[in-house]
Image: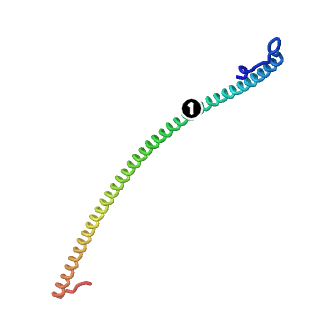
Amino acid sequence: MDIQLKDFNKTLRGYDVNEVRDFLEDLAKQMETLAYENKVLRDKIREKELLILEYRDRESMLKDTMHTAQRVTEDLKKDATREATQLMTQAKLKAEAVTRKAQQDAKAAIEEVNRLKKHKMELAAQIRSTLETHLRLLDKIENEEKVAIDINIPTKR
């Protein structure tokens, strides 16, 4: 706009050469400054674009890392669930085995107690029988003594 509105003083041969030269020098300096600022701004834009690319790469890596972490977490959960299921199954099998063993041991103990009771009853019957036999013998001996006394046969003692 300054260029369009610039008005040069006229001289006999046209515009004042010094004034035009000064104006062109000013214009060149301004153009140089603008070109430098334009270069600086373009460099900053390039830096920002590089930063944006770097941030996008980081974002992509972070997304990949998050997806990997999610997959690993899901895999760990599945493995933990599977392992827990296996442990539960093993524990149930062991519990069933222990229960069966305890039932077998209890059954064996009951059978042993019954066998011992039967043996006790047999021993008691044998002892009773022996005692009854001895009592009969004793009765027989006492009866023989009474009979011998009634007859007055001396008995040996």
In the depicted structure, whether residue 153 falls above or below residue 108: below
Mark 1 highlights which residue?
A: 60
Q: Which image quarter holds the C terminus?
A: bottom left
Q: Is residue 10 left or right of residue 119?
A: right
Residue at image location 38% in from the left, 49% down from the top: 92
Circle 1 packing at 10 Å, graded few (<14), some (14-19), many (20+), is few
* Near-viewer residue (4 or 44): 4
**Residue 17 at x, y = what percent?**
82, 15
Task: Determine the secondary structure under disc 1.
Answer: helix
Residue at image location 47% in from the left, 39% down from the top: 74
**Residue 131 at x, y = what percent?**
25, 74
The part of the image, by quadrant, that contains residue 38 is top right
**Residue 105 at x, y = what percent?**
35, 56
The part of the image, by quadrant, that contains residue 116 is bottom left
Q: Is residue 43 left or right of residue 72?
A: right
Residue at image location 38% in from the left, 48% down from the top: 93
* Near-viewer residue (38 or 91): 38
* Near-viewer residue (29 or 88): 29
Q: Which image quarter holds the N terminus?
A: top right
Dot 1 amino acid type:
Ser
**Residue 96 at x, y = what percent?**
36, 50
Q: Is residue 116 left or right of residue 132?
A: right
The part of the image, by quadrant, that contains residue 10 is top right
Q: Is residue 63 left or right of residue 30?
A: left
